[in-house]
Image: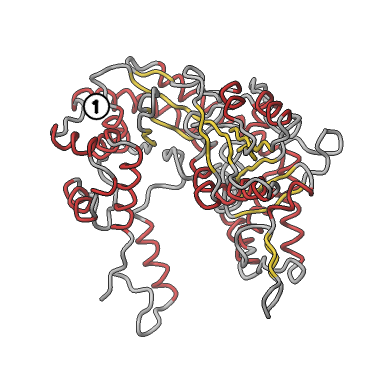
Amino acid sequence: MIEALPSRGVPAEQVLTELKALRDKDLPTHGGRLFAYVYDPAVAGLDDLAMSAYALSAHVNGLDPTAFPSLLATENALVAAAARVLGAGPRTSAPEVVGSVTSGGTESLILAVKAARDARPGIEHPRMVLPVTAHPAFFKAAHYLQVQADGVPVDGQTFQADPEAIARAITPDTVLVVCSAPSYAHGVVDPVTEIAAIALRHNIRCHVDACFGGWALPFLKRLGVDLPAFDFSVPGVTSMSVDLHKYAYCPKGVSVLLHRDAELRKPQFFAFADWPGYTMINPVISSTRSGGPIAAAFATLRHIGDEGYLKLAGQTRDAVQGLAKAVSDVDGLRLLAPAETTVVCFTSDDPRLDLFVLADELSSRGWHTQPQLPYAAMPASIHLTVTAAVAPQVPAFGPALAEAVEAARAHGPVRLPDELLAMAAALTPDQLTPDLVAGLAETFGLTGEAGAGGRMAEVNTILAAAPPRLRERMLIEFVSLLQRPAFS
């Protein structure tokens, strides 16, 4: 066990050696073989530039922008860049777009919900309408802010939000309508034009969540990819979010929340003066904010530039097309949704081919994917988030996938004891004890420093058998089990 607070200080070189040893156990953040969590453009020297910029402003505090004008300047520059990429500017219908830099997509979405809620103080029980494919951060916002989230089904073939279903779900208490560009699970762009028009008719705010792939979509459109309108060029879109630590390839965590005008943004702020200290004024959730991530993002955008992002989008498009072809060429696999953005999502119609086993087989060969559990009528699937760094890896992926499929068929589907599956389906969340989860974690080798780094097919099979509320409780107990400090 490494102590964070030893009795005597440790030399700097030893501390870095220890951290590097810990990092060796992580999944690879570079190299184009991890299809989730990280975004790698494979641009030489970019990491060093970003980290140098980060260090320059790491101790700058965003609590008071007047004290640190460098932070104010770089933040405004990032907001202007995001607004321009997402359809704002003097020659568009949204020339006055304003925004804020946040720590990530979840914070951006929480603030978008807060602004919509607080703009309608006369509504005692506010609600928002969103497709079931919307990011869970909206439901987190609903939980935190006491806003009822009304999830509506999506089209069973396209996985796009259904405008008619959204229109039917709107009530006099609805303060916000949500759509995705694109959705995370399937990489699908919702029909923003139709949904925003519905919101406009009802005088309701419409937020477009472009956190995931929104930075890439405008560049893909410039390259000729046929994508529907989704940005501030669409009447009725009142706010948008885009994560710069995704396809802008900035270090984590930097996101931008944009509003069509300053009046729409005002309810996002929090101010408090009724105490003897300084008057608190926060545009975002955090008070103290390090300038490091903002400076790193500024340096990244400046270094890559518009032409650079266009080139990276082209590499991503080529990688998506190559991976999609590799999937389609394998008997028993099929694309679940068209691979038109930055996602390849596929499933299997072969009962002998267990997708959870396939994910393990790919992982054992150095390809780390993201299995997705079945939901409603949607089958289990494998999700690939594709970045520019994946492009050189595409020729090797096809043979590896074919080999992994054959190995998965030879292994066969996961067969868990009937009583275990019955328990997973019948238990209520309140019946799930920490000891029971600890026993399951030990059974499947998920305890210790390795965490969940081993084969996961059995675990995913159990989770797939459990109702959503029970699944949530299982994972809460499991993460609680992992996040326990050891005291010497």
Residue at 56% x, 46% y is 147
From this viewpoint, which residue is outermost toward the bottom? Answer: 8
Task: Judge whether residue 338 can be spotted in this image.
Answer: no
Spot occupied by residue 115 in the image (x, y as percentages of width and height)? 67, 49
Number of callouts: 1
Compared with 186, 264 (above or below) is below
Quadrant where the image shows the C terminus: bottom left
Task: Judge whether residue 200 can be spotted in this image.
Answer: yes
Residue at the disc numbered 1: 408
Residue at 45% x, 19% y is 325
- Depth check: give the residue in front, 366 or 372: 372
> Dot 1, how many residues are within 10 Å of its Cα: few (below 14), some (14-19), or many (20+)?
many
Compared with 13, 128 (above or below) is above
Q: Secondary structure at mark 1?
A: helix
Spot occupied by residue 304 in the image (x, y as percentages of width and height)? 67, 44
- Depth check: give the residue in front, 33 or 331: 331
Compared with 175, 299 (above or below) is below
Quadrant where the image shows the N terminus: bottom left
Is 354 positioned to the left or the right of 112 in the image?
left
Is 90 positioned to the left or the right of 150 in the image?
right
Q: Residue 307's image quarter?
A: top right
Residue at 79% x, 49% y is 262
Q: Residue 396's image quarter?
A: top left
Spot occupied by residue 241 in the image (x, y as percentages of width and height)? 64, 43
Coloration mode: secondary structure
From this viewpoint, which residue is outermost toward the right? Answer: 90
Q: Amino acid at mark 1?
A: Ala
Spot occupied by residue 34 in the image (x, y as percentages of width and height)? 42, 40
Residue at 36% x, 36% y is 367
